[in-house]
Image (cartoon, coloured by chain):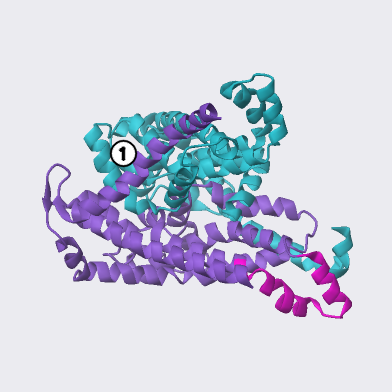
C-alpha cells in the first residue's frame, strides 16, 4: 500500500477522521456497554441513576433468569440444536461441495441451479408450508424438525461456499492421491479436509451464528416452553418484563455472549466469509 | 470414470434431497395452499378467492404502505455506510480494528438488537431517563406510530450500516490504485477524486447494497417488528412478512397467509430480476 500513499490524505488530515470514526464506533459500543452495566444492578438502583455506575454490583438478575425463567435450559437447548445443525450442514456440504468442485456428477448443472435458486428465497414464504409439512410428518415440537429446517435453509449457501473453496485445491494433488489408490473418503479426509480447513471453519462460524440467532422457525416449530431455544425465550422475556430493564438486559447479554465470543476469537474467519458473501 | 461419476452424484444426493424436500417442495406447496381454504387438516379448493380477498383488504393495503415507509431507512443506511467506508479507506491507524467493531451488530440476533432499542425507548428506558435530566416528562414512544416506525428505522440503520460499509470498502479496495495516483499527479484534490473516481468506480457495489436493503425491508423485518412493536399500535408498524405470520397462526385460514406469502415471493422475485439486470448492464460497460 505504500506506493499509493501519494493519493491519500496526509497523516495530519487523518486525525479528524480517526476521531470521527471513534465517535461512530462509540455509538455501537456504548449501547452494549449500557446493557452489560444495567444487567449487573437492581431495578431500584437502575432507576435512581441509570447512566452512572451501579452502587452495588449484583448478579441476581442472571440467577433469577437462570432459575425461574428457564434461560439456562434454553441456553443448553440452543447449544444442542445449533451444534447439531452445523455439524450436519458441514458434513453434507463438504460431500456435495467436493463432488461439485472436483468430481464428475450426473446433472451437476441441475443440482447447482437448484441450490442457487433457493438460496435467496425469502423466509416468510416458507413458514406456512414448512409448518404444515412438519406437522404432517409429526415432528413439530421436536428438535429433529427444527434441525432439519436449519440444515435445509443453511445448505444452499454452504454448498456454494465450499464448492468455491474446494475449487482452489490443485488437481495434481487429488490426482496423486488417486494414483496412490486413495478412495473417495480417504481423499476427502486427508487432502480436501485439511486443504479446505479454513474455509470449513469460516462456514462453521457463519452457520452457527445464523442458527443461534434465528427467531421465527424456533418460535413456531418448538411451541413447548420446556424446549424453547434461547432467542425466542429472550424475545418473550423482553416483551413480558418491559418495566424491569436490568432483568431483560441480563437476558440480552446471555443471548449476545456466544456471538460476541465468536466475533472476538474467530473474527479472522468471519471477515473472510464476508468477502465470499460479496462475490455471490 | 463412470464409477467416479456415480460416487460424485451420491455425494450430492443427500443435500439435494433435503433442500428439495424442505425448501423447493414447501414453496410449491405454498402455491397450492394459497388456492385453498385450510386449517392444516382439510384443504378446500377455493380458486383465486384468497387473492381477491387480499386485494380488497384494507389491512393489506395499509401494511404494504407501511413497508414503503420503512424504505426511508435505505438512503440513511447507504449514506452512513458510504461515509464510513470512504473514511475507512484512508487506512488510518487502527482501521482494521474499526472493521471488527462495525461488524459487531451483524453477529447479534435481530431479537437482541430489537430489544436493545425497545428497552432504550421504553417508558423507563435510557432515552426517557436522558430526557428526564432536562426536566422532560417520560414519553410513551410506542403508542405513537410515527415514533414506532422511526425507532425500527433507527434499529435498521444501527444494525446495517457497519456491514454495508465493509461491503463498500471491499469495492473501494478493488479500485486500481494507479487511477488515484494518476489523478493526484494531475492535481485533482481529495474531493474531486472522491466525486470523479471513487464514487463512479463503486457504483456496482452501491447498486448491490441498494437492492439488498430494499429486499431486506420487504422480507426480513419480522424480527424487529416482533420484538419492538408487535406490529402496533393497531397495524401501523405491521410489515408484510409479519402479517404473513399473524395470518398464519392467529386465523383459521392458512390459505390467506399463504396467498400473501406467494405475492411477496413474486414481488421479491421481481426485485431480484431487476437486480440481475442492473448488474448485467454494468458488466457491459
Which SS does the magenta portion mostly show?
A: helix
Q: Residue at x 60, y 26 (%)?
A: A188
What percent of the width, then of the height, locates residue B39? 15, 47
Q: Residue at x 85, y 74 (%)?
A: B182
Q: In this rendering, is residue A195 above or below A52?
A: above
Q: Residue at x 68, y 29 (%)?
A: A175
State which chain is coloured purple.
B
Q: In this rendering, is residue A269 above or below B258?
A: above
Q: Does the segment drawn in magenta span residue B183?
A: yes
**Does residue A2 appear left or right of residue B96 in this picture?**
right
Q: Tell which subunit mark 1 falls on.
A: A
**Does residue B268 appear left or right of residue A7 in this picture?**
left
Q: Is residue A250 visible?
A: no
Q: Is residue B276 visible?
A: yes
Chain A colour as displayed: cyan
Q: Does the segment drawn in magenta span residue A104?
A: no
**Does residue A143 appear left or right of residue B209 in this picture?**
left
Q: Secondary structure at mark 1?
A: helix
Looking at the image, which residue sits at the far front?
Answer: B2
Which one is nearer the viewer's eye here, B47 or B195? B47
Q: Quadrant of residue B34?
A: bottom left
Residue picked out by circle 1:
A221
Q: In this rendering, is residue A252 above or below B86?
A: above
Q: Which span is picked out in magenta?
A: B176-204
Binning the other alpha carbons within 10 Å of mark 1 as few (below 14), some (14 to 19) or many (20 upward) gives many
Q: Residue at x 71, y 30 (%)?
A: A173
Q: In this rendering, is residue B89 above or below A175?
A: below
Which one is nearer the viewer's eye here, B197 or B86? B197
What percent of the width, then of the height, locates residue B74? 50, 69
Amino acid at each position: 500500500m505504500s506506493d499509493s500513499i501519494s493519493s491519500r490524505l496526509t497523516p495530519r488530515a487523518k486525525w479528524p477522521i480517526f476521531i470521527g470514526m471513534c465517535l461512530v464506533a462509540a455509538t455501537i459500543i456504548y449501547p452494549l456497554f449500557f446493557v452489560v452495566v444495567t444487567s449487573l444492578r437492581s431495578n431500584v438502583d437502575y432507576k435512581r441513576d441509570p447512566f452512572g455506575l451501579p452502587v452495588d454490583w449484583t448478579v441476581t438478575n442472571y440467577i433469577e433468569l437462570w432459575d425461574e425463567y428457564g434461560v439456562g435450559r434454553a441456553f443448553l437447548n440452543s447449544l444442542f440444536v445449533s451444534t447439531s445443525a452445523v455439524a450436519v450442514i458441514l458434513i453434507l456440504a463438504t460431500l456435495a461441495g467436493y463432488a461439485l468442485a472436483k468430481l464428475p456428477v450426473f446433472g451437476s448443472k441441475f443440482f447447482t441451479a437448484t441450490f442457487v435458486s433457493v438460496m435467496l428465497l425469502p423466509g416468510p414464504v416458507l413458514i406456512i408450508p414448512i409448518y404444515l409439512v412438519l406437522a404432517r410428518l409429526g415432528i413439530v415440537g421436536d428438535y429433529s424438525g427444527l434441525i432439519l429446517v436449519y440444515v435445509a435453509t443453511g445448505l444452499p449457501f454452504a454448498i456454494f461456499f465450499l464448492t468455491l473453496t474446494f475449487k482452489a485445491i490443485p488437481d495434481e494433488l487429488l490426482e496423486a492421491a488417486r494414483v496412490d489408490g486413495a478412495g473417495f473418503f480417504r481423499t476427502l479426509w486427508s487432502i480436501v479436509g485439511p486443504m479446505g480447513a479454513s474455509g470449513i471453519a469460516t462456514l462453521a462460524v457463519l452457520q452457527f451464528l445464523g442458527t443461534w440467532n434465528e427467531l421465527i422457525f424456533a418460535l413456531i416449530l418448538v411451541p413447548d416452553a420446556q424446549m424453547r431455544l434461547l432467542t425466542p425465550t429472550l424475545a418473550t422475556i423482553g416483551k413480558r418484563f418491559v418495566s424491569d430493564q436490568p432483568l431483560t438486559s441480563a437476558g440480552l447479554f446471555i443471548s449476545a455472549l456466544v456471538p460476541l465470543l465468536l466475533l472476538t476469537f474467530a473474527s479472522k474467519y468471519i471477515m473472510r466469509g464476508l468477502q465470499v458473501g460479496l462475490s455471490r | 470414470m463412470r464409477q467416479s461419476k456415480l460416487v460424485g452424484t451420491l455425494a450430492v444426493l443427500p443435500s439435494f434431497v433435503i433442500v428439495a424436500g424442505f425448501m423447493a417442495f414447501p414453496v410449491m406447496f405454498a402455491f397450492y395452499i394459497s388456492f385453498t381454504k385450510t386449517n392444516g387438516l382439510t384443504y378446500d379448493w377455493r380458486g383465486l378467492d384468497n387473492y381477491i380477498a387480499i386485494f380488497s383488504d384494507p389491512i393489506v393495503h395499509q401494511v404494504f404502505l407501511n413497508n414503503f415507509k420503512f424504505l426511508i431507512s435505505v438512503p440513511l443506511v447507504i449514506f452512513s455506510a458510504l461515509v464510513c467506508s470512504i473514511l475507512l479507506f484512508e487506512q488510518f491507524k487502527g482501521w482494521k480494528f474499526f472493521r471488527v467493531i462495525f461488524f459487531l451488530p451483524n453477529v447479534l440476533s435481530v431479537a437482541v438488537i430489537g430489544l436493545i432499542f425497545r428497552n432504550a425507548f421504553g417508558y423507563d428506558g435510557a432515552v426517557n431517563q436522558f430526557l428526564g435530566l432536562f426536566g422532560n416528562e417520560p414519553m410513551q414512544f410506542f403508542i405513537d406510530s410515527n415514533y414506532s416506525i422511526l425507532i425500527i428505522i433507527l434499529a435498521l440503520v444501527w444494525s446495517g450500516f457497519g456491514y454495508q460499509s465493509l461491503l463498500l470498502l471491499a469495492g473501494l479496495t478493488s479500485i486500481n490504485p494507479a487511477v488515484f495516483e494518476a489523478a493526484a499527479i494531475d492535481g485533482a484534490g481529495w474531493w474531486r477524486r472522491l466525486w470523479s473516481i471513487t464514487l463512479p468506480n463503486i457504483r456496482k457495489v452501491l447498486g448491490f447494497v441498494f437492492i439488498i436493503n430494499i429486499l431486506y425491508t420487504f422480507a426480513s423485518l419480522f424480527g424487529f417488528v416482533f420484538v419492538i412493536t408487535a406490529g402496533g399500535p393497531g397495524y401501523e408498524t405491521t410489515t408484510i412478512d409479519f402479517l404473513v405470520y399473524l395470518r398464519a397462526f392467529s386465523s383459521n385460514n392458512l390459505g390467506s397467509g399463504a396467498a400473501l406469502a406467494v405475492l411477496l415471493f413474486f414481488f421479491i422475485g421481481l426485485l431480484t430480476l431487476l437486480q440481475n439486470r442492473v448488474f448485467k448492464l454494468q458488466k457491459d460497460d
